[in-house]
Amino acid sequence: MIWYPYEQLKTMKPPYKVVDAKGVYLYTEDKEMIDSVSSWWSTIYGYKNEKINEALIGQVKKFSHVMLGGLTHEPVERLSNQLKDFLPGDLDYPFFSDSGSVAVEVALKMALQYYMNKGEAGRTMILALTHAYHGDTFKTMEVGDDEDYHFVLEAYGKSKYVVNIPTEIQALEDAFEKYGDKLNSFIVEPLLQGAGGMRMYDISFLERARELCDEHNVLLIFDEVATGFGRTGNRFVADLVLPDIICLGKALTGGYLGHAATVANKKVFDAFYDDNPRHALMHGPTFMGNPIACTLASKCLEIFQEEDFMSKIKRIEEIEREEMEGFTHDKIEEVRIMGACVCIEVKDGKDIEGFQEFAYERGVFARPFVKYIYSMVPYVISEEELRKVMRTMKEWFENK
Ligand SMILES: *Cc1c(COP(=O)(O)O)cnc(C)c1O
């Protein structure tokens, strides 16, 4: 028996079995459905994308994998050069890994060691947000704050190394006042907290965070594993407020293969770059910089720019607002829209039970959770398909 994610296997309903996928569509034996989740927010260029397929096959014919320990190759060099140009500021130093969780682990390790290398080993604490989600590995669970995912950590009790605050400027200022000289980093999912419930907040919070990080000499980490590549309506939130380290994953490889990057700025990089072997970053996932993954990511970056995906995202947001703005119902707490993300939060989680089957019947794949019905569609979706997704979400509340 297979372990499926986040499920009580004994009581879960059987998952839909996919036999084919193309564009925004997933196919089961008897149904075609629009993937309104983009396979956990990653398949932004659509399934079976011709250009991406071609790039992948081209690389497979050369070599599929070599380790990055003692070896290097053109795909990883090309991708790092592209990222250097594509990312804002001096976020020029990528460390590659195989998943978003590991990218965050690496960012947190960099932040801790940054201060050790500078002779400030006492900076062991991390500031993070309430409702934060940064992955499922142990340190990412520790900085995360979602009892719905990580109740296993209750065995340890509250960590003394992590403080979680709400996205309020007063709480931010208080935390820096109290812990400023013990913090190595402040980590956030900028503007949009995904797995913690599609919570959206204002850029002014991040602007103030940047100021406070500078004042107190604390590194600012943006976990853009979910928000990167246009999801918030910005290419990256880092275009608006510049972090010291950015984590990329999910859409980086267009949903084809797991790969991620932790990209540091020059200030961070320089604290590691000297003659002392103990100042080296001791990390090296087996599949880091995998040539197929790098080739995919390169092609994705090219498509994103050449096909002007930002304008597609703007169009998606316009349609979402037309369909969803002002939509209310007794059972709805709030409707939230940002970029290519729509979330309906209901007052009682029971009121979304059965929505997945309801959507499936109408040809939409959805994955509601806790109290949230949401969409994060592939950017290649047509207007008609997008309206269908929005209407399916609204129709659920008819006759309720
Ligand atoms: C999904 C996600 C991660 C974890 O990425 P994985 O590839 O699943 O390990 C980390 N941070 C954020 C914000 C995410 O949405």
Image (tube, rainbow, N blue to C red):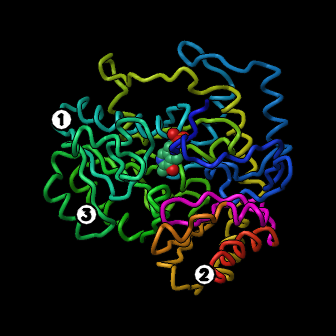
Residue 400: image tag: 2
**Splitting the image into 4 quarters, where does residue 108 fall?**
top left
Identity of the amino acid at label 1? Glu
Is residue 288 found left or right of 132 in the rendered image?
A: right
Bounds of the magenta span?
Answer: 357-383
Examine the rendering and report whether any part of residue 127 can be seen: yes
Q: Choose mark 2 or mark 1, whichever is in front.
A: 2
Residue hosting label 1? 120
Q: How far apart are marks 2 and 3 (CA)?
A: 40 Å
Identity of the amino acid at label 3? Leu
Secondary structure beneath label 2: loop
Point out the residue furthest to the front here.
10
Question: Looking at the rendering, in which quadrant would you find the N terminus?
Answer: top right
Give how far across and how far down residue 103 sits, in percent: 47, 37
Residue hosting label 3? 172
Q: Are marks 2 and 3 in contact (CB under 8 Å)?
A: no
Give how far across and how far down residue 65 sits, in percent: 67, 19
| Residue occupying the point 43% across, 60% down | 241
